[in-house]
Image (spheres, rainbow, N blue to C red):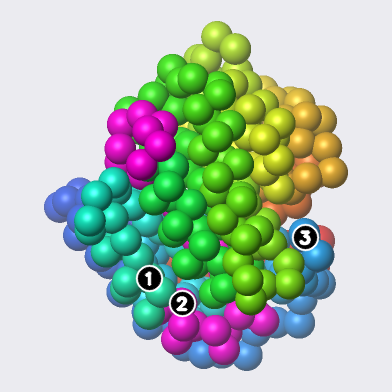
Amino acid sequence: MSAASVYRPLYELAERLSPEIGAGLARLAVRAMPALPLPATRRTRVFGVEFSNPLGCAAGFDRDGRLLTSLMHAGFGFAEIGTVNVGAGAAQMAPLEPVLRNLRRAQRVRRQLRIGVSVGTLVPDLAPAAAAACAQACELLAPCVDFLVLNLSRPGSALRAGNFDAAALRRFLVRAAGANLARDRAPDPVPLLVKVAIAPDAHEPLPRALHEALDAGAAGVVVAWEGWSDRQALYRCLERVAGIVGSRVLVAVGGIHDQDDARACLRSGAQLVEVYRALMQRGPCHTRHLAAVLSRA
Ligand SMILES: Cc1cc2nc3c(=O)[nH]c(=O)nc-3n(C[C@H](O)[C@H](O)[C@H](O)COP(=O)(O)O)c2cc1C
């Protein structure tokens, strides 16, 4: 019996007890991944950086970057850690401290595992203080990562719902990108992406934030597909997003469980794909296998 086939029923049992126990088991399984030699891969070049394969771990799984080496052993070509939510006020940068410590430790794996950090804020609107905090976070994180993501997909946020002032979002993005550009030691700015969620029941399926972010100069988008049961409709929508994103970077996440899902997203215009539930539900042996298969695609 393989480790992958033992993991799934164990996870289902743990998840039934509580989602926290399920998540704890998944993280334990990732930590337990042995440092086996990684299969030879067909490398992917995205924003001028080589990725060992196009499969990434989505934001939310490793919030502070403590699992980065293990995620490399689980086959991932990249990981988006966070979201690190910074607030307004004196303690605004406190959530960043453990992340920066873990990122410094993980620098030696960065050739094999590209690293992005998702930054967000719990401040309910695009208040200048929140924009300043996100900009400062981007500036501090940029030297340790390959890309940054501003999370505009937080459930319940005005940004996700589309209730925002476009000029404020633009100021927000320009400020975050500007802080990244202004870093004195960096010869190149770190690509700044935005994450937006697309739900199938949205009246206008492409969120305003997507257009605004691209207009404001984002290097690309992470599109999160949530609640789509009609996969063909999802791929058509992804093709539409790819047309808008153009030569910038498109990362797809949401409902990707196996090689067919991942390949279909890559064929529909995504350069990279991320998984969250596939890692939780099927475990790290599955993602390692998936990464190996995608590398041969
Ligand atoms: C428990 C949980 C926590 C999450 N936390 C974050 C987060 O902090 N930041 C973020 O951008 N997305 C977060 N996500 C969303 C995932 O990154 C991903 O977009 C979503 O789960 C869809 O992908 P999947 O179908 O592969 O699970 C979270 C998702 C779950 C289920």
Where is residue 91 drawn, in percent x and y? 23, 58
Check if residue 109 falls in the magenta segment: yes
- In the rendered structure, which disc, 1 or 3, sits on the residue that comes first in sequence? 3
What amino acid is found at the position of numbered circle 2 in the picture?
Leu
- Image quarter in which the C terminus is found: bottom right
Characterize the local packing of mark 2: few (<14), some (14-19) or many (20 or more) Cα atoms within 10 angstroms.
many
| Distance in Å between CA atoms under marks 1 and 2 | 6 Å
Q: Are marks 1 and 2 in contact (CB under 8 Å)?
A: yes
x%, y% of residue 169?
53, 30
| Residue 17 is covered by the magenta coloring | no
Element type where label 3 sits in the image: strand
**Residue range of the region highlighted in magenta in the rendering:** 102-129
Location of residue 53 (image quadrant): bottom right
- What residue is drawn where x is 30% and y is 37%? 123
Tag 3–tag 2 contact (CB < 8 Å): no
- For disc 3, the neighbor class at 10 Å (few under 14, some 14 to 19, many from 20) is some
Residue assigned mark 3: 46
Mark 2 residue's CB less than 8 Å from ligand 1: no
Q: In the current view of this chain or complex, which residue is farthest to the top? A: 203
Label 1, secondary structure: give it.
Answer: helix
> For the residue marked with disc 3, what is the amino acid?
Val
Quarter holding the N terminus is: bottom left
The image quadrant that residue 185 belongs to is bottom right
Q: Quadrant of residue 147?
A: bottom right
Q: Answer whether residue 253 is visible to the viewer in this image.
A: no
Tag 2 residue: 103
* Residue at the spot of label 1: 99
43 shown above or below 137:
below
C-alpha gap between disc 3 and disc 2: 21 Å
Disc 1 crowd rating (10 Å Cα; few below 14, some 14-19, many 20+) is many
Amino acid on which disc 1 is placed: Val
Taking depth in this image into account, of 26 and 63 the one nearest to the observer is: 63
